Image (spheres, helix red, strand yellow):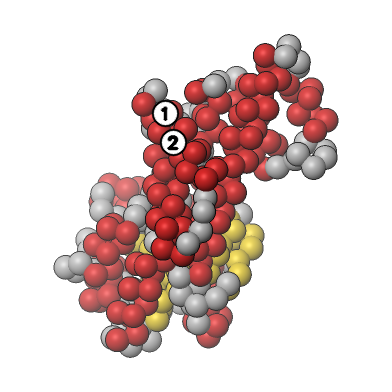
Amino acid sequence: MKKVSFIGLGVMGFPMAGHLQNSGYQVTVYNRSPKKAESWVQQYGGTMATTPARAVKDSDIVFVCVGNDDDLRQVVLGPNGAFSGMKAKAILVDHTTASATVARELAHKAASIDLAFVDAPVSGGEAGAVNGQLTIMVGGEPSTYSAVESAIQSYAKFSKLLGPVGSGQLAKMMNQICIAGVVQGLAEALHFGQNAGLDCTQVVEVISQGAAGSWQMDNRHKTMLNNEYDFGFAVDWMRKDLDIALTEAKNNGSTLPLTALVDQFYADVQKNGGSRWDTSSLLTRL
């Protein structure tokens, strides 16, 4: 039985680590809030540790899923961080949605101490994590990806190596750019339809079968029309991700006018108390 570790048991990491345990891996978990780790062990078995360094001892693969660049550096590079406890040749798989810069930083550090690293941000939200149906964008060396691919399949419906370290994070930025534009378009269409006196549920039934169809339309139009936003991917998280994309765009010379505009629309939603609402809450500002 291959020994692995999972650091970060948030809404995504908690079920992802569970899928690994249920797939036959021996999983040791660490979470900055110990109660979450205790709850995970009660639900799935496995073991918990009090520091990242202790959690990764003797593991072949270490998975990380935390909030942002600073969180990532803390649990990997900080005192008692993962890199200080990993055995030689072990691999760190980072599922955090973070910058390409921090991915390259960690990969460089890993290589200097005989470790390996891949950045592997995920898409699919909490439901995808719970159902083991995530899409995973990976950056790293082909041999490293091959060594972790079967473990990743425990919670993924699709994963692909897209290039060197940092490529996964850049792909995730593209993913979030696409989502921002699609959700705003859907919000405006529903707003228009309501003002025009149409039955928007019936209209969506029709237009979703054509070129306008999207995951957002299929999964969010009903809740948007019912003004229900207490689920899914939070506005605060989306703004964090869009900030990463907009910063990267400045660095590589890209122009993202729509993304910048929708980011400001999300700022309006935050001001209206919607920081923890689902990203489909763009409709509320209309």
Query: Which residue extends farthest top?
Result: 197
Residue that carries the numbered disc 1 in the rendered image: 268
Residue that carries the numbered disc 2 in the rendered image: 264
Q: Residue at x 63, y 28 (%)?
A: 188
244 on left or right of 283 = left
Residues 117 and 186: in front is: 186
When asked about the image quadrant of residue 110, the answer is bottom left
283 on left or right of 84 = right
Asked whether disc 2 touches disc 1, contact meaning CB atoms under 8 Å apart, the reply is: yes
Q: Residue at x 24, y 70 (%)?
A: 77
Q: Could you tell me residue 256's position as x and y percent?
A: 52, 50
Q: Residue flagged by tag 2: what amino acid is it?
A: Gln
Residues 256 and 90: in front is: 256
Q: Is residue 49 visible?
A: no
Q: Could you tell me residue 205's position as x and y percent?
A: 79, 29
Q: Could you tell me residue 103's position as x and y percent?
A: 39, 69
Find the distance from the CA under tag 2 to the CA under tag 1.
6 Å
Query: Which residue extends farthest left?
Result: 79
Q: Eyeballing the image, is 270 above or below 128?
A: above
Q: Residue at x 31, y 51 (%)?
A: 38
